[in-house]
Image (cartoon, rainbow, N blue to C red):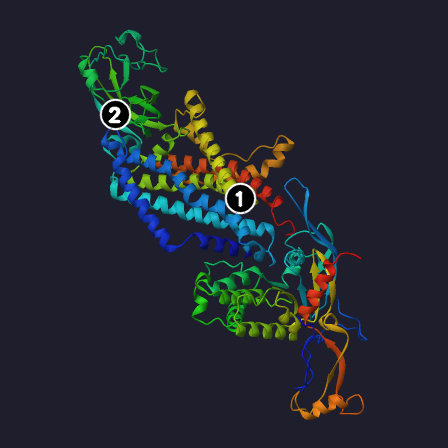
Amino acid sequence: MSNDRPPVVAVGEPSSAGSGGPAVASGGPSEPPAPVIEATRLGKTYRDFWGRRRIHALSGLTLEVRPGEIFGLLGPNGSGKTTSIKLLLGLIAPTAGVARVFGRPPADVSSKARIGYLPEESYLYRFLTGEQTLRFFGRLAGLSGTEITKQTGALLDQVGISSEARRRKLSEYSKGMVRRVGIAQALIGSPELLFLDEPTSGLDPLGMAEVKELIVGLRARGKTIVLSSHLLADVEDICDRVAILHRGRLARLGAVAELTEAGDRVELRVTGAAGVDDPRVVAAAAGLRAAGLSVEAVRKARISLEAAFVRIIREQDAPEP
Amino acid sequence: MKVLAVAGITLREHLRPWPLAALAALVLAALFAGYAAVPVAEEAHRPSAFLSFALAAAPFFAFALAVAPACFSLPGEFEFQQVSLVFTRPVRRWQYLAGKLLGHAGHLAALAALYQGCLAVAAALLFPAESPGLLRYCRAARVEARGTLRQMSVRGRAGLYLDPPESAAAPGAPPAESGAPPAAGGPLLVFAFNGLPEAARAAGGPGRAVGEVVLPALHVAGRSLLADLRVAVRVRDPATPGAAPLWENDYRVTAGRAERFNVAVARLPAGGAAPFVVELEPLENHQRLGVARGGVRFASGREGYAWSLALSGGVMLIKMLVVLAAAVLAAAHFSALVNLVVAGFTLTVAMMASFLRMVIATVRADAPGLFTSREEVFQRFGPRPPPSVNSFFDRFTATFRGFFEALGNWFPDWWRADPDSTLTLGLAVEWRQIVEASSVYLPYAAALAAVALLTFPLRGVD
């Protein structure tokens, strides 16, 4: 499998994919905003009934998630992603380290009012209709009746559940429709921080594209999103930074752009060419070293996030020299 | 709000209209079939025997249909992870557990109402609108018999009699009950037999029964398990109705297999026949299972049945709530099977405790639960003063006890308005029993809730 992307021919404005979202703190003159999530040497060891250590699910996780960014949490199965999310949601208590969400412990109820969660599986009540599901979670979020009614209609419209469908029970929904309702329930209460675990799971390509647009739109509205997904192309498209976990440890943390750099290789972009077979391009390529066309951009070549991910995991698995 | 949201969803999960309607139809069919099948010695006793049987079956119905599903509730939510989703919202542990318990309690209440409602429908269709004639004493609270009796002799029959002993010719008769003969007139004989007046007539006396008391009895496998009843007998001179009785006494009537108990009163004439008035008044032993509710149940036909149903439903609900709490709360982190075992064990213990209380009361014939007058009953179950505070423990529990005392005192105000009514007496006693059961069971449920909060599986949750 090639780690290189095909040569890119400019098609308009420069792509911003993977280059960081608008609210990413990249070290400006002003004071950077306080992180939404802070984890310091966070660890979780599951014990058996007799208190004996059974599984080190997570060790020494230290990371920050900044406001307004889309943060990807990646890793192979069993790498500690779900444990990390449960720790940050306050569903389980850490056995080591400290986590803070909005500056407070994750179990703190006041901070939970600002959080939405879409689990990997749709843990929704199948005997409820789509509308009842949102009303229930709206009540748990502490919304007023009027606000629940308003948000329920708007969110179901937003995720594409029709008026007729929203009055049917979830047991009668397709997997994709349940997923859409799950996304809507995560959004009710207008949370500032969203944990989305495999948000595009079960969706058709169109649905996947819609969800990706929705996530990008949420970032544009200032929401912070923690995204866990195995669809690395999606993560690469929309995430600002990612953390790669492996065997319960943080294998790599950084901006997508950093992780996908292709070593010492350089990528050249030109404008005005009809295509890669354009004779001028061919000629330019042939005579570029001597003299040539106006060069628009020269940048490091990139590999896909998937390739970077595989490389990082293999490095971790490689025996120590 | 959040508690109600969790309770609402729990209730919605378990209460579906169509299964509920089907269940109601099934219960009704079973009740009608049971009415025909219940074994009774006499047809007139069928309603009471059926009611006893149906009420005894109510906890099993509730256990099977409300408590058992509750055992699967929390383990199910953990298995399918809905609980994780709930706790990502600003919900506290106690709110979730209280909501679950409230929802299951609502389910239990709905099923209890369904069962009792079906029973009420069956009672309305099957039971007589009026009390059977032989139960009129309980309904009227007092009955009078007027007449003139001559000397009556009874031989070879066991019975109760009054001094002078020489007037009772029965050899081997039991010792005399307490009571004094009237100062004036001839000595008085009071006989209480199974089978009078036929036996009395057969023995050669012209006496007649002036009253008949039927003991409510629970039949199990053809055997009568109850009961115990007190009957007040008063003899008055009809010429001076407002004066103190010439003679009065109370008798405890205990039934083994017998259900019918006759009381005959005869004055031995001092030189001739004398007119008299006899009053009979049943004094229920309200601490004996069956008899207590029998007092209400026999009070006034359908009305009595209705009250009996409502109140016994209340007691059943409270006791089953504890079983429910055991299932939902204390064992929240175990499997459904373990929960079921815990709930079943709690139910068994609760039922064994009730049974043990009944046995102890039966063995201890002079237990404080035996009442000889309405005043005694009133003192036992009527309004009580605030609890006294004598020790640190008293101070600790005074508020708690005071609350339940105040709650228990609420009903007797109605009772005071109609103190001669057996119905209101019975209702007051039942109410007191509900409150007393609550004062014992609710702290137990609270303790279970505390255990549940401390052992809740999601340790990170507030």
Give residue A300's position: percent from left, percent from top.
Answer: 76, 78
Q: Chain of mark 1?
A: B
Give residue B228's position: percent from left, percent from top.
Answer: 36, 25
Rendered view: B403 above or below B239: below
**Is residue B427 shown left or right of residue B271?**
right
Q: Which comes sooner in the sequence, label 2 or label 1?
A: 2
Q: Chain of mark 2?
A: B
Rendered view: A281 above or below B449: below
Q: Quadrant of residue A317?
A: bottom right
**Is residue A262 shown left or right of residue A215?**
right
Residue corresponding to mark 2? B211
Residue type at mark 1: give it.
Ser
Give residue A70's position: percent from left, percent from top.
Answer: 67, 69
Rendered view: A302 above or below B48: below
Give residue A257's position: percent from left, percent from top.
Answer: 73, 73
Q: Quadrant of residue A52?
A: top right
* Any part of residue A102 in sight: no
Residue corresponding to mark 1? B335
**Is residue A263 shown left or right of residue B150?**
right
